[in-house]
Image (cartoon, grey):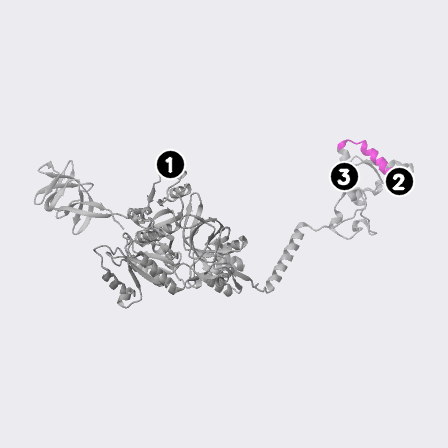
Amino acid sequence: MSENKTRKKTLTISKGIKKKIDPKSFGKESKNSFSIQKKKSNFGFKKNFKNDINNLNPVKKNLSRKFIEQQATKNLIKKDEKPAGKSKLKLKGSVDKRSFKLTVSRALNVEEIEIKQRSLASVKRARQKEKKSTLENEEKKEFKKIKRDVKIPDQITIQELSNRMAEKSSEIIKYLMNMKVMATINHSIDKDTAEFIVKEFGHNPIIDEQPVIDDEVQSDNLDKNLQLRAPVVTIMGHVDHGKTSLLDALRSSNVVSQEHGGITQHIGAYQVETKNKKTITFIDTPGHAAFTEMRARGSKVTDIVVLVIAADDGIKPQTIEAIKHAKAAKVPIIVAINKCDLPSKNISKIKNDLMQYELIAEDLSGDTLFVEVSATKKLNLDKLKEIILLQAEILDLKSSFEGNAKGIVLESKIDKGKGPVSTILITKGKLQKGDFFVCGNSRGKIRAMINHEGNLIQVATPSMPVEILGMNSSVHAGADFFVTENEDDSKKVLEFRKENKVSNNLKIADKTNLFDKETSKAELNIILKSDVQGSTEALRDAINKIKHDEVKPNIILSDIGMITENDVSLSKASNAILIGFNVKPNKEAKKLAEEQKIEIKYFNIIYEAIEFVEKALSGLLEPNIKEILYGSAEIQKVFKVSSAGKVAGSKVVSGEIKNKSKARLIREGTVIYEGEISSIFREKSAVKEVKNGYECGISLKDFIDFKEKDIIESFTSEKQERFI
């Protein structure tokens, strides 16, 4: 017994923990297994073990903790009944690699509840798989195209049409290209074309119609209080044939003195009262060629046309044009032969010339009324009024004097104190102060009405020209005018008109390539400002008629009213000429023009403004180069001179050779040099010129390759300005 005790040795492990091991069993166990005495209780073991650890240094403490972790791991393992060498380790739970992972719970022998969680990569793979399967299912489904109700106005852009159909604009453009029509998304198409495209794309077109306010006005006026109205008479004819002078004589006024250059440049509307207390409305139109639109507008609103022809001048181009306008409007014509008091009159020739235009006088078995008048002597003016009233009785002119008024704009302007002002000719109904109205692309409320005498009136009836105040913006001459029941109705009509505003019309039938532009032509940018809409219209049309192969006018702005700072700034930015017709700039615009060094051209007569534009366009033309030949000389022999190099010994065969003139050298019919004569020598002396038959030495600038029989020509060139 004592012997066994002495044989027992106490081994100290490198980790600092003493373990008593039986020497007989030493080496028989595996290297990683230890037999710990279990004589002591677990509590005693832990307590002694803890005391042993506390007695160790810090390094050994860390090693002891590692030993505790290893020991805790071994508690999870149990030995099989088989021998130690062939033992198998079995886990308490299911066999999984994660079971070997050391956690805090396992280290402290605490039961843990393991919650398995998917990795992020696994979740992503699952989502991608789900998304892929969803897309495959969607591709397999057959989508049914949605048929939409597409609202179509009078004019619509391709971009807006594609938005309303929920189709790609490129598909619409491609369809138009197949129809041989080039277009972009900004181009507008008409109602019929848009309807055709909508049907082709499988949608249901709905035509946008204007509110029926116009029809309501007409229906109200048709059957209410029909009464005889004053005839509307338009004075037409060639310029300077006495139209305005005749009208002045009829109404005992002097309008001619107020017109610049003695020619009418505005539409004037007046009322004249006869001896029988009857009223006649006269409309005076300009006779200048540029005012074609004014004459056409005057013939459309009139009942009777009085064609004024000068007895000493006869039929002129504007006379023929006035006849065509009157015939197009299907109104009767009364011929007034003016200046019949002059000794150079030839009335019979005028009557014979008018026969070719189907205007045959009564004394020549025709039905056209002729009157010989004199505006200066006031001859036969009453007879002219009687004939007009007689013709009006035959026409039986009647209109409604009740209901909402309707009319047409004769002239429009912007007054400095009144704002937008328009002259309206009432055609139906009764216009009163305070009425709401729509006029063109403008609306408003009647604030005031002024008659042709300049007096304020409260009510206007058919055939009466009035000047109205209360528009929110200026309108173009010839626009329609009608009264609405209230302000809401006027807003509805105006919104519809703005949506259907005509711009860049493009039709299927038009096969013109919209991208072909006259890029080679030089452009003259122009800004026009005038006093009234009619003058702006006439100037714009006259300038646009100027045609040339190399230059063209480009009107970037045409408006009414005085010249403002914005006009001057636009002129500076676009390098445009600024033309004011019967208008002047305000103080700010004038100051800005002086600072920017921009010249403003002012005109009172229309043909002077047109001539100025033609001259400005002529300045853009390349001048013609005219060549003047002085003479020619033939080279006889070539000399070498130390100071001048080679000199051509020549004989003048025609004209004369001048020093410092332009020269060309011709060899066997080909020009091989063109430059300048640097010097001419004759008998060792420099001369300015050598005449025909004399010999001389000629040296050319930067050229010495002379050969015998070469021809030297002396000439000059002049620039000649070109005009349109």
What residue would you read off at disc 1?
Answer: 595
**Picture quarter containing residue 598?**
top left
Image depth: mark 1 or mark 2 in front? 1
Q: Which residue is mark 2?
A: 41
Estimate the spatial distance between the alpha carbons at disc 2 and disc 3, rounded to whole Å: 22 Å
Most common secondary structure along the magenta stretch: helix
Q: Quadrant of residue 18?
A: top right
Image x and y of residue 174, in percent:
46, 61
Amino acid carrying mark 3 in the image: Lys
**Are circles 1 and 3 on residues that touch, CB within 8 Å?**
no
Disc 1 from disc 2: Cα separation: 112 Å
Give yes or no for contact between labels 1 and 2 (Cβ–Cβ under 8 Å).
Answer: no
* Residue lying at 78% horizontally and 39% vertically, measured from the top left: 67
Identify the disc placed on residue 66: 3
Disc 3 secondary structure class: helix
**Crowd band around label 1 with a 10 angstrom C-alpha radius: few (<14), some (14–19), many (20+):** few
Q: Which residues are magenta?
A: 41-58
Query: What amino acid is found at the position of numbered circle 2 in the picture?
Result: Ser
Whether residue 564 appears in this view of the structure is: yes
* Amino acid at the residue labelled 1: Glu
Give whichever of discs 1 and 2 has the lower sequence position. 2
Q: Position of residue 133 (x, y in %)?
A: 63, 60
Report the side of 448 relative to 363 (left or right): right
The tag earlier along the polypeptide, 1 or 3, is 3
Can residue 72 be found in the magenta stretch? Answer: no
Q: Picture coordinates of residue 189 (x, y %)?
A: 45, 59
Q: Is 260 placed above or below 353 here? A: above
